[in-house]
Amino acid sequence: MSQPRSSYAVGTGLFIVLGFAALAYLATQTSSVANVHQGDSYTLDTQFTNIGQLKERAPVKIAGVRVGQVQSITLAPGREVADVKLSIDKSYNKIPQDSVATIFTSGLLGDQYVGIQYGSAKQVVAAGGALARTKSTEPLEEMLGKFFGAGNVVDNVGGSYAVKADFTNVGSLSVGAPVKMAGVVIGSVQSVHADPVKLNAQVVLAIDKRYNTIPDDSAAAVFTSGLIGTQYVAIQPGGSPDMLKDGDEMILTQSAMQLEDLIGKFLVNGSSTDKKDAGDGKSDTPAGKH
Amino acid sequence: MNQHTPQGNNVVTQSLTQIGNCGLFLLTLLAAIPRSFRYVRETIRQLWFVGAMSLTIIMVCGLFVGMVLMLQLYHVLSIFGGTSASGMVVALSVYRELGPVVTALLFAGRAGTAITAEIGLMRATDQISAMEMMAVDPIAYVGTPRFLAGLIAMPLLCCVFCAMAVFGGHLVGVTWLGIDNGTFWSNMTAQVDVRTDIVNGVLLKSLAFGAVVSLIAVFQGFTTPPTSEGVAYATTRTVVASSIAILALDFVLTAFLM
């Protein structure tokens, strides 16, 4: 009688141990205990004009290393600035007084965090003190909005007329993609095929009959809606008195911008201006030697 | 225990009567907890039956859920070049929803039905009446130990399920599809939060589901008509009622905890 009972007890005990082992595994291996556990810390006050998507408990980093978290975010009474309290680990208490707190985004679409860049002052900011110099979040949307437009697809009603346009590169433009003017859909792409002689892409646009007063020197460009959206053809009206008719060809075209090229150029330009001083200093030395 | 008296033929009235009886039965079960302490060995035996014996199905299912989730996510996220986040998404979706819900559904099918059928047959063969004759409280000896065992076993089973799902995701993602091992773990640890995901998601939800499933199973066993047809009907109803209760409660809990 006691034999089966003790085997139940052993099996049950093993089961409970296994369950708690799994819980310990989840808590320690797959989640960051540091997110909850906070050692001794002190607070710093900062003020930002725009915190973007920054949230409470977002990390605070120095040189990319996590040193604390955002304790609270409140609107400063009577002013259009956000009071952000940072809770920073006691062991990092040598932050110069003129350090700059900046709101960064990790990656292109990642979470936002507060980065602190050390200044050169001898004085160390005291516990409970304030970092006077801050940089607010970069409005990525505004920046991108200048590059890309966006809009919604409307039904094709009332018939359409066809216009041809040649592009050197249509990117991933597909049949049925919208044709937009001023961001409003006025038609769709009827066909996309390569020209065997001119070795470029010939696109036929079906434009709604209602929009029959488009100047014939208008330009067609392949744009991308948003950062990872689909591509569409945008028409930028010209100034000619003659209008586009069925079967006409648009002369002025702008091919699809390759996001990779764009970012590549942007990054190269950005870093070259950033490092201008250092670069000049380096290039001066060999020039002086020669 | 003999409150099962459907009043009227209306479906709504009947379901409301069932829910009301179920609530009253929960109070009876809870009130019997002090008296069930002397049957602690019975509780351990039930824990062994509903918990330890369910481990195989829970572990195998957890492994496959993690593996298929990773496979699906990898193909979707590769469109956006975000495959490095797939480990994190597997962990979050399993901890917050899939782990507790799938574990509870499996638990209802594996352990809930067995509890209902066992108690129903005890009633059909007059074992419950025999216990009453011997001055053994059937609620304290049969009902409460099974309820408590379900309550304790569910969170533990859910933890095992989640751990196996993460392991399955790792198996497919890192070993097969070639996601970097370091990226897999660091993205996961950066996003999974102990309080919101593991305590609120895994533990609290599975505790609530464990209470609901074992309550329904024990209640159906005790209130079924003591016939072979009644036992079959009660077993079916345990699965149906548990599944609906789990998914509805999951929505409510998510709305309140998130």
Image (cartoon, grey):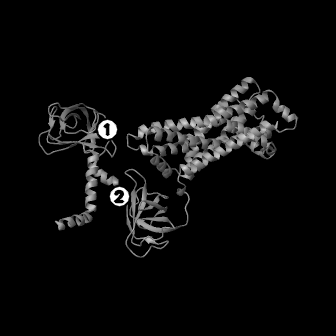
- Label 1: state its secondary structure: loop
Image quadrant occupied by the C terminus of chain A: bottom left
* Direction from residue B17 to residue A265 in the image, left or right: left
Residue A202 percent coordinates (x, y): 19, 34
Mark closest to the chain's N terminus, 1 or 2: 2
Host chain of mark 1:
A
Amino acid at pointer 1: Val
| 1 vs 2, front mark | 2
Q: Residue pushed farthest bottom?
A: A123
Name the image quarter holding the N terminus of chain A. top right
* Rendered residue at 18%/44% (across/down): A237
Res B74 → quadrant: top left
Asked whether A169 or A150 is in front, the reply is A169
The reply to whether callout 1 and callout 2 are in contact (CB within 8 Å) is no
Placement of A249 over or under A257, stated as above or below: above
Image quadrant where residue B33 sits: top right
Cα–Cα gap, marks 1 and 2:
30 Å
In the displayed structure image, the side of residue A186 where residue A251 appears, left or right: left
Q: Position of residue A36 (x, y in %)?
A: 55, 57
Identified by mark 2, the residue type is Glu
User: Which class describes the residues within 10 Å of circle 1: few (<14), some (14-19), or many (20+)?
Assistant: some
Camera-side residue of A210 and B164: B164
Asked if residue B127 can be seen in this view, the reply is yes
Element at badge 2?
A: loop
Where is mark 2, residue-wise? A138
Would you name the residue on which mark 1 appears?
A153
